[in-house]
Amino acid sequence: MRLLTFSFLKNCKFKSILYGVPRRLRSDTALPKIEDDKIKEETSLVEISPSWGDAPEHAALRAAVLRDLHVTRDFVTEEEEAALMAELEPTLKRMRYEYDHWDNAIHGFRETERSSWQPHNEAVWARVRGVFPRDMPLLAHAHVLDLAPAGHIKPHIDAVRFCGAALAGLCLQSAAIMRFQHEHHKHLQFDALLPRRGLYFMQGVVRYSFTHAVLGGEGSAWRGARLVKKRRVAVICRARPGGGSNTTT
Ligand code: OGA
Ligand code: MN
């Protein structure tokens, strides 16, 4: 099932050269670990990189980032997570994780789509769809992306041909770090800590002006602590391409 990767990632603006696990983190197994119970205590799940600086011309952009990215903890309960996994697992299990050629946008993944759900999962899916602006048309199907513990997604911007003005992703089975970098001003970076069972939602400048990447197991760190990324399953809802609100302000 390669169709999804080709749709969303192969056709998007993707710069393999930019990607790299920061060297100092690569073998930093000595860092303290951050586990799910510690993540609950984190006051903010978005961390602007110090490299951003405090130049006044970037202050408005920083405010826009905080406006256009939302990370919600505990969007689903443990029971809802288990029910979603029970429905998805038989399909996912039949597939092998793909570890592709080095220049591909995504490594250590398998994926599927789902357009109808068992009733209890349908209710969760409806809640995900409920976070979008009411007038924004959405794709009917969910994109389900299962990343192996060492799997990662390189920096990219979702192709406008395949994704409209916003997207939301449920993060199941493991927390992960999503890293964002401005397409033109590389020092404008920030990380989001995506907790297990949380939901992220991005639109506006975050959707269109920043690349996003999901870091692999070894490079995942948050405020000086190592995040042990396990297998992670994302259930992603995207706005329909060409559905309006294609702006960055
Ligand atoms: C994608 C993507 C993020 C995630 O499929 O384009 O960026 O949460 N996925 O897995
Ligand atoms: Mn993406």
Image: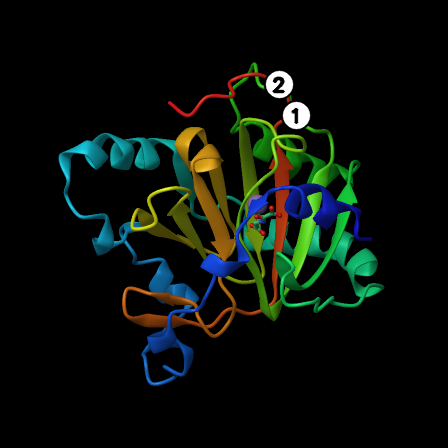
Quarter of image, res 163: top right
What crowding class fits label 2: few (fewer than 14 Cα within 10 Å), some (14-19), or many (20 or more)? some
Q: Position of residue 115 (x, y in %)?
A: 78, 36
| Image-based side of 34 in relation to 121, left or right | left
| Image-based side of 61 in relation to 85, left or right | left
Indicate whether 107 appears above or below 156: below
Say which of 200 and 43 sits in front.
Answer: 200
Say which of 39 and 59 sits in front.
Answer: 59
Indicate whether 242 appears above or below 233: above
Q: Residue at x 42, y 25 (%)?
A: 248
The disc label shown at residue 240, or none: 1
Q: Report the amino acid beneath label 1.
A: Arg
Q: Residue at x 65, y 25 (%)?
A: 241
Q: Report the amino acid beneath label 2.
A: Gly
Indicate whether 80 appears above or below 150: above
Q: Position of residue 204 (x, y in %)?
A: 43, 28
The disc label shown at residue 105, or none: none
Q: Which residue is drawn at 72% across and 42% down?
A: 7
Instruction: State the SS at label 2.
Output: loop
Q: How far apart are marks 2 and 1 (CA)?
A: 5 Å
| Image-based side of 115 in relation to 206, left or right | right
Q: Residue at x 33, y 50 (%)?
A: 189
Instruction: State the SS at label 1.
Output: loop
The disc label shown at residue 243, or none: 2
| Res. 192 visible in picture | yes
Question: Total of numbered circles in the picture?
Answer: 2
